[in-house]
Every structure is written in C-alpha cells, then in structure tokens.
Image: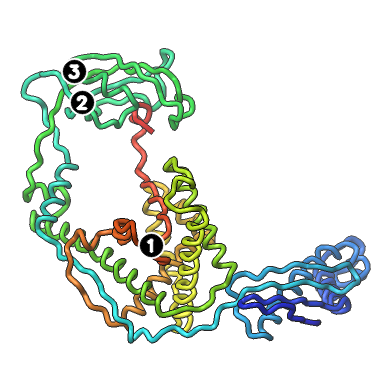
C-alpha cells in the first residue's frame, strides 16, 4: 500500500492511495474461503466447493465488499498516520481499478482547525431578568377566562346573532343522499367561530329556537375528504335553542373547573408559567451574549466546505422567504453581492461557533445520553395528539432524526457548562426589554452597517397540530 499526500492547502488535505493487486486478490480469496465454508451448492459438501466455482458464483459481490472495506480501512489509516481529524465526511473517488490490477483512489478531506478554547472563567456575562408582575397574572387569567366561554339559554326566544351559540341537529346530503360523518345531534355551534365550512354559520344567523332551516354550501376544492371536495351539499338543520355568552367569573369555582383547589392555586400556577416563559427569554439573552463574546475571543480558520454548506442553507432560506413575501432580490436595500458577503460572514461565524462548542464538549467529555434523546422524542411525539406512537417509532427507526434532536441538547449542555465557569451578572429589566428582539433593535438603526454577527433570516415557526374532530362533525367543519 502506498499513501501519497498531494495537497496541503489550509485545512484541505488530498491523498492518492494505491493498494497492490496482490493484496486485493488475497483479501478476495480469504473472503471466498469463508463463504465456501458456509454455502451449500448441489454436488458439493460444505467447505469442499472449489475456489474457481466460488469465484465464478460469488466473485463480483465479494469483490465489491472487499473494495469497500479496503477503501474505508486505507482511508482511515491515511488519516491516523497523519494525525488528522476530519471536519466532515471525506470525499473518496476510485480513479483506477480493473480486476487483476492495482486499486488507486483519491481522498479529499477538510480537517478540524487547530485552536484552544478561551479560559471561560474569565468570561463576564450579563443575564437579563424580569419579575412577574401581578398585572401580568391578572391579564393571563382574563385571557384564560375568555377562552372558557360559558353559554346560557337566552331569556326570550329572540333571533340569533353572531357571537351566540346554537344547539342544533343537522343532516348533510349530497345529491339527495346523506353522507357519512355529515350528521350530528345536540351539537353546540358558535356563530362566527368559522369552525364549519364557509357559508354554513352565516345562514343560521337570525334563526331562533324551533326553526328548521336548509343550509346550502359548497365544500372547498381542497377539502380533506376527496369524495366531498368541490361538491354542493344541503344540510337540514333544526335549531333547538339560542344561547348567549355569559361572562365567566374568575373565582374559586372557576379554578376548580380547571382542576385546581382554589383561585390562589390557579394564580400560583399561572405565575409559574409566566415565570418559566421569562426564564426562557433570560436564557436566550445569556446565550446570545455568550456566543457574541466567544465569537469576539476566537478567530481561527474554518473548513471551506462547512462554510459554503452553511451559506447555501442560509441563502436558500432567504430566497424562500423572499418568495413567500412576494418580494424579489432586486427589491432589497442591498445588492446581491453585498447580501452574499453579509450572509457568508454569518455562515463563517456559525461554523466557527459550532466547532468551538463541539471542541468544548469533546475536551470536557460532555455527552448526550440515549435517555435524553428518548425524552426529546417523547416531547416531539406529544405535539401530534393521537399519533404519538407512530411519531415515536418513526424517530426510533431514523437515526438522522435522532441526530437532529441530539444536536440542540448537546449545545444546551455545553452552554450550561460554560455558564457555570463564567461570571454571570443578572440585570433586572422590564418585560418589554426582556422580550425585545435584538434584530429589531438593529433594524431601527438604518444608517449603521449591519454587523457580521447579525442573525440570518429566521425560520418559519412550525404549524401547530390539533386533535381531529369527532367523526360526526367532520363533514361540516373546515379542514
């Protein structure tokens, strides 16, 4: 075997590796001998199949296995002999091989930069904190009460208006035939809630108890049930009662309906939830300050491939946001060249910080346990009510999805580790200041050139998944 380094430019290393034909043949023969000891062929006892026949029957597949194994082993040997740590998966290309000839392939790899993390005990950080004001607790309680609508029968049999609720029975028909899932009895429908398909609720405004109404609607073209999409339908509706919204009193009884002992317990629970939200914002402010300080304290070369890959992701996201907002590149305040330069700086900063955090974790043996990954999988599965088991099993079967969960857990553990070493000073601020987006603050300074560490375009928040409605309601309700 011959390993020749052909390039050593910055963090790039290229090698040409040659493995003699005799070594390949020896490995193939050893592998075929192993196969021959186990395989059963007509006319031969196990272990007595001639090598020539084994080579004829299994030669190609065995050769493929030997080549793959040899390339992997020799590549690793080249890295080990040169004491190289790859920054990402090396690029391997077989440049020459025919059966009976030497194997020749190239190995291109970007290596980890050589740097030493700063002394984090000298790091001074500021953490923004805010107290939970009673006014915020009261506002939250009012909002909760508003979501717990209480409808009572109207004192007089008046006509309904938007905001009222009707107790109704309905039967939906298409082409005169009732369809599955299109009927319900004793259903309470809030007028103006837009919970049914377009046009349904509007036709019930002005009805009163005892009325029987035919509601004519057309299912949307993108309706979930394909057999109903775009179809005209008639719903025979009987109105039993008109109900009006009654104000919910925030008292001990209200708290008990929510599963708590009394109003004080409810307030404590709400105060705790708000406090946890504030803690998350405080943590984000601390993390941002920490990463800014770390970026300022470290300046080492990053692997070009990693930098380009990160830039490609940022630019793709930027283009998607332009498309979604109906804007064009030429509509921006900066030229394409200026934007590409700015986002390339962002990409370099992200890669450098990522390598730095990874190195801190490696040096200090910070790891993510499988139990922690499992907990994250369970948390993700809970976002899909009714599909929890399916989502959990999907994560179990796909290691790359587990890796996506593992990465932020690892980062948080490294951030916590650095926080314990650093000197952290708390600064009390208002809630508005705590929650203010630093990027918005930067945007308020149009004359100032954006810093290279400015965040890249934000990803769209994932849509929430809601539980499916009961079958009886599906047909009339919106998708």
First in sequence, mark 3 or 2: give its number: 2
Residue located beneath label 3 in the image: 206
- Is 15 situated above or below 345? below
Mark 3 element type? loop
Residue located beneath label 1 in the image: 449
Taking the spot 40% from the left edge, 76% from the top edge, the residue there is 296
Q: Is residue 74 left or right of residue 96?
A: left
First in sequence, mark 2 or 1: give its number: 2
Q: Quadrant of residue 235?
A: top left
Mark 1 element type? loop
The N terminus lies in quadrant: bottom right
Residue located beneath label 2 in the image: 167
Name the one closer to the observer, 231 or 174.
231
Name the one closer to the observer, 161 or 133.
133
Crowding at mark 2 (Cα within 10 Å: few <14, some 14-19, many 20+): some
First in sequence, mark 3 or 1: give its number: 3
Residue 38 spot, x, y in % from top left: 80, 69
Q: Can residue 402 be seen at all in this image of the molecule?
A: no
Crowding at mark 3 (Cα within 10 Å: few <14, some 14-19, many 20+): few
């Amino acid at each position: 075997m011959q390993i020749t380094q052909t390039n050593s430019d910055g963090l790039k290393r290229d090698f040409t590796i040659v493995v003699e034909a005799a070594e390949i043949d020896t490995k193939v023969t050893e592998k075929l001998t192993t196969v021959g000891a186990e395989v059963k062929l007509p006319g031969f006892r196990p272990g007595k199949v001639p090598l020539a026949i084994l080579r004829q029957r299994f030669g190609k597949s065995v050769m493929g296995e030997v080549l793959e194994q040899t390339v992997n082993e020799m590549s690793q040997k080249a890295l080990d002999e040169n004491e190289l740590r790859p920054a990402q998966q090396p690029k391997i290309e077989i440049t020459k091989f025919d059966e009976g000839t030497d194997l020749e392939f190239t190995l291109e790899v970007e290596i980890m930069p050589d740097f030493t993390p700063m002394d984090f005990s000298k790091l001074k950080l500021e953490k923004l904190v805010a107290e939970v004001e009673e006014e915020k607790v009261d506002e939250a309680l009012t909002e909760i009460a508003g979501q717990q609508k209480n409808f009572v029968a109207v004192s007089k049999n008046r006509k309904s208006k938007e905001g009222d609720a009707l107790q109704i029975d309905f039967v939906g028909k298409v082409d005169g035939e009732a369809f599955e899932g299109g009927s319900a009895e004793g259903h309470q429908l809030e007028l103006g809630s837009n919970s049914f398909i377009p046009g349904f609720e509007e036709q019930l405004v002005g009805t009163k108890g005892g009325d029987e109404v035919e509601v004519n609607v057309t299912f949307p073209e993108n309706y979930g049930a394909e057999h109903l999409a775009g179809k005209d339908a008639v719903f025979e509706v009987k109105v039993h009662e008109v109900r009006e919204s009654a104000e919910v009193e925030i008292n001990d009884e209200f708290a008990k309906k929510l599963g708590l002992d009394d109003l004080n317990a409810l307030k404590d629970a709400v105060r705790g939830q708000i406090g946890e939200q504030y803690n998350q914002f405080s943590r984000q402010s601390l993390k941002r300050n920490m990463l800014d300080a770390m970026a300022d304290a470290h300046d080492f070369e990053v692997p070009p491939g990693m930098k380009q890959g990160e830039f490609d992701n940022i630019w793709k996201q930027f283009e998607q946001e332009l498309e979604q907002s109906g804007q064009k590149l030429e509509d921006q305040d900066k030229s394409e060249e200026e934007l590409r330069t700015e986002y390339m700086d962002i990409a370099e900063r992200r890669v450098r910080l990522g390598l730095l955090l990874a190195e801190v974790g490696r040096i200090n043996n910070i790891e993510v346990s499988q139990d922690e990954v499992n907990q994250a999988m369970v948390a993700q599965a809970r976002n899909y009510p009714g599909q929890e088991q399916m989502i959990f099993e999907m994560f179990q079967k796909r290691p790359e999805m587990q890796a996506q969960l593992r990465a932020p857990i690892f980062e948080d553990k490294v951030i916590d580790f650095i926080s314990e070493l650093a000197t952290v000073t708390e600064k009390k601020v208002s809630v508005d200041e705590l929650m203010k987006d630093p990027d918005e603050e930067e945007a308020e300074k149009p004359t100032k050139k954006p810093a290279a560490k400015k965040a890249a375009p934000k990803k769209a928040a994932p849509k929430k998944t809601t539980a499916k409605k009961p079958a009886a309601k599906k047909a009339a309700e919106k998708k």
